[in-house]
Image (cartoon, rainbow, N blue to C red):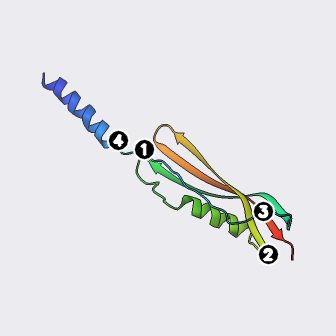
Amino acid sequence: MRIIIFKYVAIFAIFFAFNGCAQIYTGDMLSSTSLQSANFDYVRQNVKGTAFTYAILGIGGRTKSLIHKAKVDLLTNYPLRSNQALANQTVDFHTTIFLGVVVVVECQVYADIIEFNK
């Protein structure tokens, strides 16, 4: 009888320990670039910035600014000059799980670089 109770207590303890391991990454990017008139030219299209985080057994991976880090990476690789702006911005998240132990979340920010005519 003690062995059965011990098994139930062990299962409950494992369930309780891993109950908070799920993480959901969400975010939003707002663009203030107005493209209603034809006063711009595309400089580069579909440029990308990335950022990632990982968790091992649910420990780690708590990054609130994953989208911001990906956007900083994009602007580091493709700096904007005068009269240029980002347009058509999109955000993608890719989650990869290795052996059910390691979770890697990658955030990718895509945008077009436009230049306004003078």
Task: Determine the CA span between mark 2 and mark 1.
Answer: 43 Å
Quick one: label 4 or label 2, which is nearer the N terminus?
Answer: 4
For the point 78% across and 71% down, the residue is 84
Asked if the residues shown at circle 1 and circle 4 are in contact, with their CB atoms under 8 angstroms apart, the answer is no
Q: Which mark is residue 22?
A: 1
Residue at which label 3 appears: 35
Q: Nearer the viewer, mark 4 or mark 3?
A: 3
Q: Secondary structure at mark 4?
A: loop
Q: Residue at x 53, y 40 (%)?
A: 97
Q: What is the three-letter code of the residue carrying label 4? A: Phe
Q: Marks 2 and 3, Cα distance to the nearest angstrom? A: 14 Å
Q: Amino acid at mark 1?
A: Ala
Q: Are marks 4 and 3 in contact (CB under 8 Å)?
A: no
**Observer-nearest of 72 and 83:** 83
Q: Which mark is residue 18?
A: 4
Name which of mark 4 and mark 3 comes first in the sequence. Answer: 4
